[in-house]
Amino acid sequence: MTAASEKSPILLIKDFGQSIWMDNLSRNIIESGELKELISSRDVQGITSNPAIFQKAIAGNKIYDADIEAGSRENKSVMSIYETLVFEDIRKACDVFLPIYEETNGLDGYVSIEVPPNLARDTEGTVKEAKRYYEAIARPNVMIKIPGTPEGLVAVEKVIAEGINVNITLLFSVESYVETAWAYIRGLEALAAAGRDISKIGSVASFFISRIDSNIDGRLDKLIAKTNDPELKEKLAWIKGKVAISNAKIAYQEYKQIIQSDRWKALSAKGAQAQRLLWASTSTKNPEYSDVLYVNELIGRNTVNTLPPTTIEACADHCDIESRIETDLDVAQKAIDGLAEVGISIDEVMAELLEEGIDKFIKPFDSLIESLEAKANQLVPA
C-alpha cells in the first residue's frame, strides 16, 4: 500500500469508527505468521472463535497431534485435552493482539472464546466456567463468549461484576440486544460499587445478521409461491434481503439511546467503555446478494464487524466504504413493519434462530469431542 487513495477498501473502515475482527482461529494461522500479516495488511483488530470454528480447526489437523498424544499419555480426559489445545491457541492469539489492545487502551485487540455451548440455559454453570476460563487463560485481552439466552444474560451481569471481559453472542432480536446492554450496565455498576476499576472492562454485543435474512427470505419465498396477487408478490419480494440490515439499524438506534442515559453517563464518567454492537454472521449466504452486503451496509461509529477470511478478502478487493448505519431508517422500519403485514412474526423468527444457533454450536462441539477421543485412542492405543 502506498498513497491513501490506493489503500485497499478494508483499510478505510477504521476511519468511520468501525473495527474489523476476524471470525476464524487455528494454530496454523498463528504459527505460520498469517495472523500477524492479516493485522498488517487487512487491519484485523481482534478475533473470535466458537465451537464450530475449533471443530473445523482441530479435526483432522496433524498440527495438534503431539499435544493430543501427550494429554492421552498423561491420562487426561478428552475434555481436558480439548481445553489444553484451545487455551493454548487463545493465549498465543492474545499475545499477537496484545500490542493492539495496549495501543487502543482496551478498545480492540481481543480474542474471544466461548464457554461450553451446552451451558446456554445454565446460569451458574456459565458463571463458573467463564471465571475458570478467564483465570486459566490469564490474558487481559481474552473475552469470554456467553450466549444471549435469558439464563446467559443473568450470567453476563455476574461475570462483568467479576471484572471479566464478555462477548455476548447469539443475539437476534432488538429486544435481546437492549437486555444485553442493560445487563452490562448493571454488571459495571456492581463492579464500581465494589470499589474496583471499571475502565479495563471490554464487552461487545454480537448481533447476528445473515441468518435472519436466510430464515425470513425462505418464509417470503413460500408466500410468494402461494399467492397469485401481483401486488402482494411485489410487496413480499421488496422485503426480501432487507430485514437483517433493518433490524441492525434499529438496534443501533437503541444503542445510541442507551449511551445517552443517566446511568450510562455516570459509568462513563468513571472511565467505563461502551459496549459496542458487533455484527456477527456477516458472510452472505444468498448468492443473489453482494458478497460484501453485510459489510457495506453496516459501517458505523463505535461498532465492530467480525468477518470470516473469505469476506475479509472480498471486502479488501471491492467494499464500498461509507457510513450507512444511520441511513434510510424509514425504509428499515417499513421492512420490519411489513413482516407483520404479511403474517410473519419477527418474534417467532428470532426465537427459532436462537434455538438453532445454540444447536449449531452444540453439534460441532460434541463432534469435536468425539473426534478428539478417536484421535487420542489412535495415537495412544489402549
Image (spheres, rainbow, N blue to C red):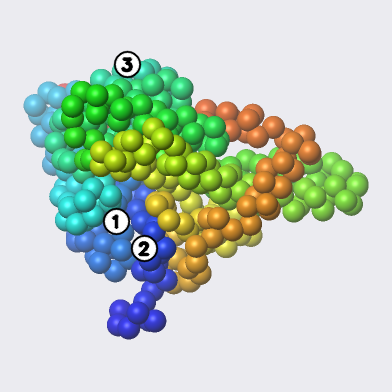
Q: Earlier in the sequence, mark 2 or mark 1?
A: 2
Q: Secondary structure at mark 1?
A: strand
Spatial separation of the CA atoms under disc 2 and disc 3: 38 Å
Q: What's the amino acid at mark 3? A: Glu
Identify residue for label 1: 45
Q: Are marks 2 and 3 in contact (CB under 8 Å)?
A: no
Residue 81, visible in the rendered structure: no
Identify the residue under disc 2.
14
* Vertical placement of residue 34 versus 338, above or below: below
Q: Which residue is mark 3?
A: 124
Q: In the structure shown, which secondary structural element does the residue marked by tag 3 occupy?
A: helix
Q: Could you tell me which residue is drawn at 12 percent across and 23 percent down?
A: 75
Q: CA distance from mark 2 to mark 1?
A: 10 Å
Task: Assign the C terminus to one quadrant of the image.
Answer: top left
N-term mark: 2 or 3: 2
Mark nearer the N terminus (3 vs 1): 1
Amino acid type indicated by mark 1: Gln
* Residue at (28% x, 50% y) in the render: 107
Say the numbered circle drawn on residue 364: none
Kindly report which numbered mark, 2 or 3, lies closer to the viewer in this rendering: 2
Location of residue 204 (image quadrant): top left
Eye-nearest disc, 2 or 1: 2
Q: Amino acid at mark 2?
A: Lys
